[in-house]
Image: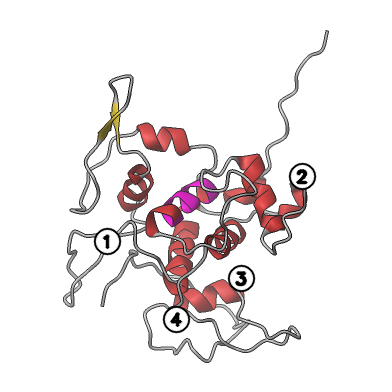
Amino acid sequence: MKSLLAAFFLIPLASAATFTDVPANVWYSTYVQQAADLGIVSGYKDVSGKELGVFKPESNITLAEALKIAVIGAGYDYTKYPKPIWEGDMKHWIEPYYRITTTEGFGIFVGVTEDVNAKARRFEVARIIIDAFMPGTAVAVMEANYENPYQDISTQITYSDGTTGWGWNSFILKLTQDGVLSGDKDSNDNPTGYFRPDDPINRAEVVKLVMTARAKYGTPGTDRPLPPTSTSSE
């Protein structure tokens, strides 16, 4: 079985939801259940709002869904963030959570034209996790040096000023360095040396990643947004 993420353990809580498509013996069961217990995820609903009792763990996740799970998992409260001023309303369920990205400067969510319904790719989710769980550190993460255990992560790039760096691959390598994620593994649970950064990622994998990041970095969103910097006026 291929596994994107490193293993981690959580103490079981009283169940808040049970999904008929998440059997207890699958690798992602604990992560999905824990996330449901904490209110980080919920199942699908019908047009009337009735819970259907399914999570669709193997469905590809969208950027909007990945963002919501990440910011809730990291403890952000969207009601503390101002609504962006755009020419028109976003008219999408992600809008309340999108407010966080515009204030905090999340790298993927930079404007209303972002295709939030697009399938999220693995490298994009790595950036979302860094933005959500290590707010304000993206530049420092990109400037750091990392070991590269992956055969499908490109070599360092040279910037116009002559310096080198890993670009957005830095976010994958940082999370790997911290033990938050790992690449594919073979049937004997040995690393294959591949990460597949451009491939889509499913809902179960993102939940495990978010819960692992939460165990590693805590919930930094609970202390945000930071108060505005005071400036003196003449």
User: Residue type at mark 4?
Assistant: Ser
Labels 4, 2: front one? 2
Tell me which label, 4 or 2, sits earlier in the chain: 4
List x then y, in percent, for residue 10.
46, 71
Secondary structure beneath dot 3 equals loop
Secondary structure beneath dot 4 equals helix
Residue behind mark 4:
29
Residue behind mark 3:
38
Residues under numbered marks 1 and 3 in contact, where contact means CB atoms less than 8 Å apart: no
User: Residue type at mark 3?
Assistant: Leu
Say which mark, if any, is on residue 183: 1
User: Residue type at mark 1?
Assistant: Gly
Q: How far is mark 2 from mark 3, CA to CA?
A: 36 Å
Q: Would you say residue 81 is visible in this rendering?
A: yes
Q: How far is mark 1 from mark 4, CA to CA?
A: 20 Å
Q: Residue furthest right?
A: 234
Labels 1, 4: front one? 1
Secondary structure predominantly adopted by residues drawn in magenta: helix
Say which mark, if any, is on residue 116: none
Tell me which label, 2 or 3, sits earlier in the chain: 3
Labels 1, 3: front one? 1
List x then y, in percent, for residue 157.
27, 34
Q: How far is mark 4 from mark 2, CA to CA?
A: 43 Å
**Quadrant containing the C terminus in the rendered view:** top right
Residue behind mark 2:
87
